[in-house]
Image (cartoon, rainbow, N blue to C red):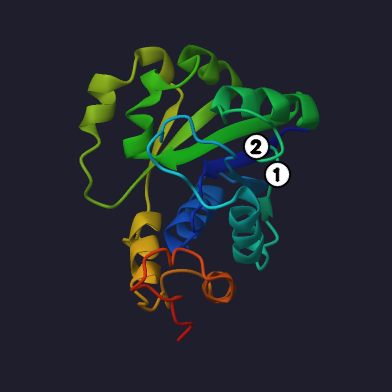
């Protein structure tokens, strides 16, 4: 029997409500049996950005997804040495989950616009379908002009109403000692405060929980 599996990768530094809302919308819309959240170990497309330690980011994903039985945190990339390439992850998942798993790769439409810079993008379409997530009203015509037909034919567009927030903004707020409440799950906010994540500047302090 076929099983539709969503794959949501990223640095998750930190994970926030925008990630969770997109995953849940995709799960319902495409009748996914589960969604795997896969924090990457070493992102190849962000050479100037040093993410938080992988174990910290994985812990936050575990905390954020614990309340949804259809969500699952995966260590597949942080346990694999070297740069984290999507093609390698999909091949590993195929080996682990077998031929009955149908993969849906969930990513922001802006990220999918850069697919041609990924490793072996033409092979990705053989392993999965894509869900391009955007905000309501976002102009997605660029995808039609940028993504090759072979990949575009495997792509589904998904508008997700939700929190207009980014991990970059959360890191900035945490460094400034501003509240992250209503932007990320409470256990994640507590974890950030407990470990003093993102408070790298002398003026910064851990983000308050409330």
Label 2: how many residues lie within 10 Å, few (<14), some (14-19) or many (20+)? many
Q: Quadrant of the N terminus?
A: top right
User: x and y percent of residue 119 in the render?
Assistant: 49, 18
User: x and y percent of residue 25 in the render?
Assistant: 48, 54
Front-most of 91 and 125?
91
Residue placed at 51% from the left, 73% from the top?
Answer: 189
Query: Which quarter of the picture shows residue 4?
Result: top right
Residue placed at 54% from the left, 41% from the top?
Answer: 9
Disc 1: which residue: 75
Residue placed at 66% from the left, 53% from the top?
Answer: 55
Label 1: how many residues lie within 10 Å, few (<14), some (14-19) or many (20+)? some
* Image side of residue 96 versus residue 76, left or right: right
**Up/down of 138 relative to 150, above or below:** below
User: x and y percent of residue 29 in the render?
Assistant: 50, 48
* Image side of residue 27 versus residue 95, left or right: left
Q: Tell me if residue 97 can be seen.
A: yes
**Up/down of 158 relative to 64, above or below:** above
The secondary structure type at the circle numbered 2 is loop
Q: CA distance from mark 2 to mark 1?
A: 6 Å
* Image side of residue 206 versus residue 114, left or right: right
**Up/down of 2 relative to 196, above or below:** above
Residue 40 disc label: none
Q: Tell me if residue 162 can be seen.
A: no
Front-most of 177 and 123?
177
**Up/down of 197 relative to 77, above or below:** below
Disc 2: which residue: 77
The secondary structure type at the circle numbered 1 is loop
Q: Quadrant of the C terminus?
A: bottom left
Q: Are marks 2 and 1 in contact (CB under 8 Å)?
A: yes
């Amino acid at each position: 029997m076929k099983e539709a599996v969503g794959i949501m990768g990223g640095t998750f530094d930190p994970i926030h409500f925008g990630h969770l809302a997109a995953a849940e919308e995709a799960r319902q819309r495409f009748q996914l049996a589960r969604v795997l959240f896969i924090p990457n170990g070493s992102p190849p497309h962000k050479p100037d950005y040093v993410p938080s330690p992988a174990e910290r980011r994985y812990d936050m994903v575990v905390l954020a997804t614990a309340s949804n039985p259809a969500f699952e945190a995966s260590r597949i990339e942080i346990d694999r040495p070297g740069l984290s390439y999507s093609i390698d992850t999909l091949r590993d998942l195929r080996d682990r989950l077998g031929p009955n798993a149908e993969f849906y790769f969930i990513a922001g439409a802006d990220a999918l616009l850069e697919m041609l810079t990924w490793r072996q993008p033409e092979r990705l379409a053989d392993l999965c379908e894509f869900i391009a997530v955007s905000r309501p009203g976002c102009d997605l015509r660029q995808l039609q002009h940028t993504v090759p037909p072979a990949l575009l034919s495997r792509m589904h567009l998904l508008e997700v109403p939700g929190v207009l927030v980014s991990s970059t903004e959360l890191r900035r707020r945490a460094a400034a000692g501003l509240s992250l409440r209503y932007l990320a799950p409470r256990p994640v906010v507590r974890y950030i405060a407990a470990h003093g994540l993102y408070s790298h500047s002398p003026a910064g302090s851990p983000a308050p929980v409330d």
